[in-house]
Each structure stands twice: as C-alpha cells, then as structure tokens.
Amino acid sequence: MKYICSNCGAQFPKWSGKCSACGQWGSLEKFEEITEISRVNSGEPASYKPITDINKKTSNKYASNNRLSTSFSELDRVLGGGFVEGEIVLISGEPGVGKSTLLLQVAANLIIQNKDILYVCGEESQSQLYSRLERVGGGKSSSKFRKLSITDNTDVDAVSKLINKKHFDLVIVDSIQSMSSQLSRSFVGSVSQVRISGTILTRTAKQSGTPIIVVGQINKMGDVAGPKILEHIVDCVLNIEGEKFNQYRIVRGMKNRYGSTNEIGVFEMSSKGLIEVLNPSLVFLEDNHKVSGSAIGAVLQGSRVVFVEVQALVSEREEGGFTGPLRRVANGIKRPRLDMLCAVISRRGGCFLGNKDVYVNVVGGLNISDPALDLAICAAIKSASRDKILNKSTIYFGEIGLTGEVRGSWGSESVLKESGRVGYKNAIVGRAKIKGAKGLEIKKISYLKQL
Ligand SMILES: Nc1ncnc2c1ncn2[C@@H]1O[C@H](COP(=O)(O)OP(=O)(O)O)[C@@H](O)[C@H]1O
Ligand SMILES: [Mg+2]
Ligand SMILES: [Zn+2]
C-alpha cells in the first residue's frame, strides 16, 4: 500500500496529515497499484523488427508537416506547430479560466476543415455545451456542427474502445477528473482514478494515432487530484493563466515533447469566447498616471518579447511600531527572488530596505521567472522607496547577481529591437556586447548602485 499526495504527486509508505514534500495538509490519498504479476509471464513475448522496416508514410496522418493545426496561430506556436499524431496533451488551469471555451473553439475551427471530433463531456450538461458551441462557434448552424460528436460516458474504458474503433481526428476529454475506470475501486476524481484514466488515454492515443487533449482542473485547495500527477505521463502540458478581473489569458507550454517549452500564446476573453492577441507585446501595460514605484521591464517569452509593468510599494516601519517579520509580498514573480533582490538592493544597491515592507506586483497576471526582469523590479523598488517617478518611455532589462552586478541577459538583441519598434526611447541594460536599435538610446550599467 502506498500513499500519494494529490497536490504534488509525492509518494509515501505511510499516511500522514501533512505532505512533507509540498506542505499541503490532508492531501495524502491511498493509492492502489494495479499489479497482476502472475499474468506477466503467461503472454506472448514482445515482437520486434529492424527500424528500417518501419514505413514512415503510414504514420503521416497530417499531410505535409505532420501537424494538425488548431487554426489558432497563438495555440499552434505553443504546441510546436499543432498536434502530432497520437499526442496526448494536458490543458490545466483553474476553474473558469477558459479551458472548455478554448477547446470548444478549437473543435469549431476543425469541423470547418471537415475533421471528425469527439468531445467527452463530463463536467457540464450536453445541452450547456451545445449552447456554448453556438455562442463561440458563430451562431446556430446545426448542419455545420454535425462533425462534432459528443458523449457523456465517463467510463474511460468505454471511451478508449470508441476511440480505437472509430478514428476521430481529435478527441477532447473534459475533464480527466470526471473520468473513471473499473480497474480501480477508488472514487471518481481520486489520484488513482486520475492516474489510471490518464494512462489508459495515453495508451489509446498511441494505439489509435488520435491526438487526445485532456482537461485537468487545478484546485488551490488541493482537494481534487491535481494535474501534477499526469505531467510525466503526457506528451505536452499547457497551462492557462489569467486573473479574474483581467481579460487576458496566457497559454503557456510547461512541457512539450514535440516543441519548445518557453512559448506563450495570448488570448483575450470576450462574450464570443477567446480571441487571439497576435501582437501582444504591449497588452500587459497599464495606462496609468504618473506615480512612483512603477518600472517597465522587457522579457522574452519563447520567441516573443513582452513588456510588463512592475509595480512596487515600499513602506517604512515606524520606530517602536509593529515589529513582526518584514513583509515581502510578490505577485507574478517568485518570492525567493524578491527576497534575494531586496537583500542585494539593501547591501549593494544603495537603498536600505531592512526596516521596510516591500510589495511587488507584475501587472496583467503574467507569471515571470526570467531573471532579465530583475533590473525592472529593482528600479520599481528604488523608485518607490525614494518616491521618484521613472520615465515611462524607458525599459529595463538585465539580471542582477549577488554582488550587485548587472548582467546582460540572453536575448537582448531581440528585446532592444522590439523596444525601438514599439516606440520606447531609452533602454537601461546590463553590461554586455549589444548592438544598438533604431530610435533607442541605450545606457549600460555595471552595478545596481548606478541605477
Ligand atoms: N454564457 C456566457 N456568456 C459570456 N461569458 C461566459 C458564458 N459562459 C461562460 N463564460 C465565461 O467563460 C469563462 C470560461 O469558462 P470555461 O471555459 O467554462 O472555464 P473552464 O472550463 O476553464 O472552467 C467563464 O469564467 C465566464 O467568464
Ligand atoms: Mg470547463
Ligand atoms: Zn505534496
């Protein structure tokens, strides 16, 4: 008997109230492995053949480039050009972020190209799904929609048989948490069921050559078996990010066996569904009045440059006032990175933060782990601390080291080119060999103190 954490997937021989790997409470679940070892030696041995016997032509399902395009270039790029034959893709995201909407739109795009799609509808009612298709698929047109088949059968074994029997061009399983197999006696949505369903669907995708997309709900409470458990089984993991009160949705490639993982696709939520934002470099900026504590950073997200506003608030503790631990609150960047930057600014950046609370927010809901944003974060913090307004036509780009040095970051050439193109006037960057860009005045600094 094993126990597995539904939040992070760590395994333990014993149950405990708290997962020692991720710190989540009450997330350990009993996990039964399907082991019928007695049967292992009774079947036929595996067959094999020289690799040259493989006929490449027969696996050429998607014509010239071997990819099934979604007709969304923002999504195709994150996938690495579209779906690959037999690929299994996990789409994760919090409830309401737009997973079902996006996939239904992909289905609507594909049925126009005469593709056969199966939608396994385990989350909402079939009539709800139909009215949503009318909303996002361009009005009532029942004849056009006939190529989209739907089932509410959530028995993964039955669905798998159907996929093997009738070759669909694409199958959408919404969601993996609603599927279950008779091989497991655990309840629907448990780690065992999610894992078995994911494994069966993966095998089905490989056997039938049909690409399968599975939706995985992320639940902050950790009470639903998380998509983490499936990450190593599937070929590709896409996460949809977005904030409730912001219309932008970012599809981010977290893992991809058939493409690069740093790509993002940007969409805007509307009443007709998600709309592609084909030139998103400026959408994460806020048109605000001039205040201190705001700096604009540039980051590379896959093959594209995105500008983001970093906002900081620095508040000094009054002498003799509240003496709890200092607050370092980070939104859109990792908290340890903020701690490190605050320490460097204090010790080597000429701006003491040891008695100050620091809050940092990346506007627009983007999560950024690229250290090239360091310089913009430091600029926003120093600006807030000294109450000095920064020039809105300046971008910051550079990584900060522990000694307070500012390094030029990878990708600076395309960042500077794009900065000039969209109309920025100045760039403050780390010291590195850099080609200039049209209309952009570049200032190189070696140490944070110079900022
Ligand atoms: N009838 C509707 N009209 C306008 N917007 C809607 C409608 N139904 C859903 N939405 C919007 O679509 C968003 C995404 O929903 P959905 O695709 O079901 O999310 P998920 O599948 O990720 O849980 C919802 O948060 C809501 O804002
Ligand atoms: Mg949904
Ligand atoms: Zn855990």
Image (cartoon, rainbow, N blue to C red):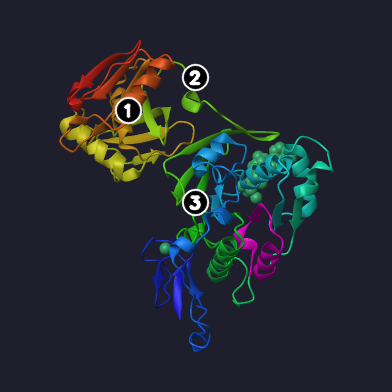
Measured as percent of width and height from the top left, residue 382 is found at 28, 25
Q: Name the residue beneath numbered marker 3.
A: 237
Could you tell me which quadrant the C terminus lies in? top left
Look at label 1 and name its amino acid: Ala
* Residue 5 position (above or below residue 137): below
Q: Secondary structure at mark 1?
A: helix
**Mark 2 or 3 closer to N-term?**
3
Determine the quadrant in which ligand 3 lies: bottom left
According to the picture, the residue beneath numbered tag 1 turns out to be 376
Q: Is residue 154 shown above or below 435?
A: below
Q: Where does label 2 land, which residue?
A: 287
Looking at the rendered structure, the kind of residue marked 2 is Asp
Q: Nearer the viewer, residue 277 or 80?
A: 80
Q: Position of residue 237 (x, y in %)?
A: 49, 51
On the picture, is 217 further left or further right than 423? right
Which disc is residue 312 wearing? none
Q: Quadrant of residue 355?
A: top left
Tell me the mark number nearer the camera, choosing from 1 and 3.
Answer: 3
Residue at position x 36%, y 40% in the image: 369
Q: Is residue 140 above or below residue 392?
A: below
Helix, strand or loop status at disc 2: loop
Q: CA distance from mark 2 to mark 3?
A: 33 Å
Q: Residue at x 69, y 55 (%)?
A: 168
Identity of the amino acid at label 3? Val
Q: Which residues are magenta?
A: 156-180
Side of 271 where 350 appears, left or right: left
